[in-house]
Image (tube, rainbow, N blue to C red):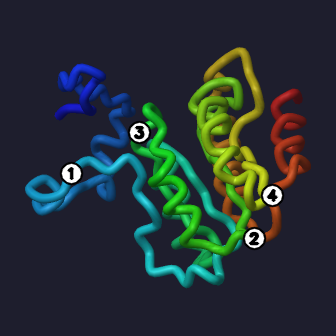
């Protein structure tokens, strides 16, 4: 697979970072048609038949957390959350991201959800690229994920699962994502 061409038109190899669990995930599959026609898409918009006018939150994420969010939405029968996947971070697919945003009401809250702590992962880069796309609508990009940390993991599988469940719950809960919810996660971590 190739990720694109550089300034001279030379093809560059595509590098994929993914956990093994995603390689074996039963829903992380493609049809033969996906490989034989079309091409790589930097952004994958919502795949469920949601009523666009009912969407109050548009979620952007990358990686395996998508499948956890999708499962939670199906389990809760939540129709107010649209989930889009950012498959290529750089160069940032501004046009494709704008297309996804324009499918939903301009009042819909826009969030970036990630599994990694706030100071790790793609949050900082994505926020710098996505916030200018929202400025015309006076919306602010919200963050849902773990608080900043010196370590990429808690060191406890049980604690990790609790934090992951809170991230998914915060994402699917009706009402605006607020800093209050994130403070709860930070307070629990300090105990």
- Residue 98 location, quadrant: bottom right
Q: CA distance from mark 3 to mark 2?
A: 26 Å
The mark nearer the N terminus, 3 or 1, is 1
1 and 2 marks in contact (CB < 8 Å): no
Give whichever of discs 3 and 2 has the lower sequence position.
3
Q: Which label's residue is closer to the chain start, 3 or 4?
A: 3
Q: CA distance from mark 3 to mark 1?
A: 13 Å
Asked whether residue 94 appears in the rendered view, the answer is yes
Question: Which mark is first along the chain, 4 or 2?
Answer: 2
Instruction: Return the residue at label 3.
Output: 88
Residue neighbourhood size for the residue with mark 4, other residues' Cα within 10 Å, grouped as few (<14), some (14–19), many (≥20)? few
Point out the frontmost of discs 4 and 1.
Answer: 4
Q: Which residue is mark 1?
A: 39
Q: Quadrant of residue 121?
A: top right
Name which of mark 4 and mark 1 comes first in the sequence: 1
Residue 158, percent from left and from top: 64, 37
Front position in the image: 148 or 169: 148
Distance between mark 3 and mark 4 Cα atoms = 26 Å
Q: Which residue is mark 2?
A: 107
Picture residue at 88% right of the left edge, 29% below the top: 191
Q: Are marks 4 and 1 in contact (CB under 8 Å)?
A: no
Residue 81, x across and y down, in percent = 62, 69
Q: Which residue is mark 4?
A: 138
Q: Residue visible at 57% across and 79% down?
A: 52
């Amino acid at each position: 697979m190739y990720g694109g061409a550089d300034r001279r038109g030379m093809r560059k190899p595509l590098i994929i970072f993914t956990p093994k669990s995603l390689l074996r995930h039963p829903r992380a599959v493609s049809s033969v048609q996906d490989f034989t026609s079309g091409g790589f898409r930097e952004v994958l918009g919502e795949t469920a038949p949601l009523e666009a006018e009912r969407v109050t939150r548009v979620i952007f994420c990358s990686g395996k957390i998508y499948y956890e969010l999708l499962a939670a939405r199906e389990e809760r029968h939540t129709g107010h959350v649209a989930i889009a996947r950012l498959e290529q971070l750089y160069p940032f697919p501004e046009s494709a991201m704008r297309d996804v945003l324009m499918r939903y009401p301009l009042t819909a809250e826009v969030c970036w959800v990630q599994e990694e702590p706030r100071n790790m992962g793609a949050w900082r880069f994505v926020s710098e690229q996505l916030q200018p796309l929202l400025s015309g609508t006076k919306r602010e990009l919200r963050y849902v994920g773990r608080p900043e940390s010196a370590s990429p993991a808690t060191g406890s599988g049980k604690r990790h699962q609790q934090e992951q469940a809170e991230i998914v719950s915060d994402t699917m809960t009706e009402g605006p994502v607020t800093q209050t919810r994130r403070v709860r996660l930070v307070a629990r971590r300090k105990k």
